[in-house]
Amino acid sequence: MVGLVVDDERRLGEEEEEKEEEEDKGKEEEEEEEERAPYIRAVYHTQLTFEAAIRLQEYS
């Protein structure tokens, strides 16, 4: 009976560690996205600017 309790406690501890690792991984991914966001916006804006310039040339 004592062995079962110890196994359950160990299993619970492992599950908690896995949850924490998943949360940490999620936080790291969010931080990376936040760091890349300005660059992504800049590239997107540049792309829109070039598309607009091409359209203006077509109509000129």
Image: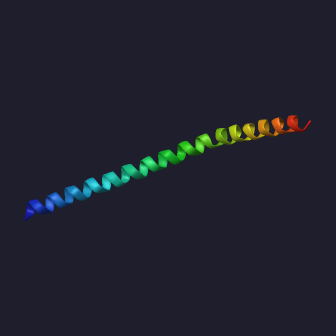
Toward the right, the furthest residue is 60
Q: Does 42 sit left or right of 28 as displayed?
A: right
Give x and y (percent) for residue 54. 81, 35
State which quadrant residue 38 falls in. top right
Q: How many marks?
A: 0
Give x and y (percent) for residue 36. 60, 40
- Report the front residue among 4 and 40: 40
Q: Residue at x 9, y 62 (%)?
A: 2
Q: Residue at x 31, y 52 (%)?
A: 17
Give x and y (percent) for residue 59. 89, 39
- Report the front residue among 9 and 59: 59
Toward the left, the furthest residue is 1
Pick the quarter of the image with the N terminus.
bottom left
Q: Residue at x 77, y 38 (%)?
A: 51
State which quadrant residue 15 falls in. bottom left
Pick the quarter of the image with the C terminus.
top right
State which quadrant residue 3 falls in. bottom left
Q: How is the protein colored in the picture? A: rainbow
Q: Is residue 7 above or below residue 33?
A: below
Q: Does 37 sit left or right of 11 as displayed?
A: right
Q: Does 14 sit left or right of 44 as displayed?
A: left
Give x and y (percent) for residue 20. 37, 52
Q: Residue at x 86, y 36 (%)?
A: 58
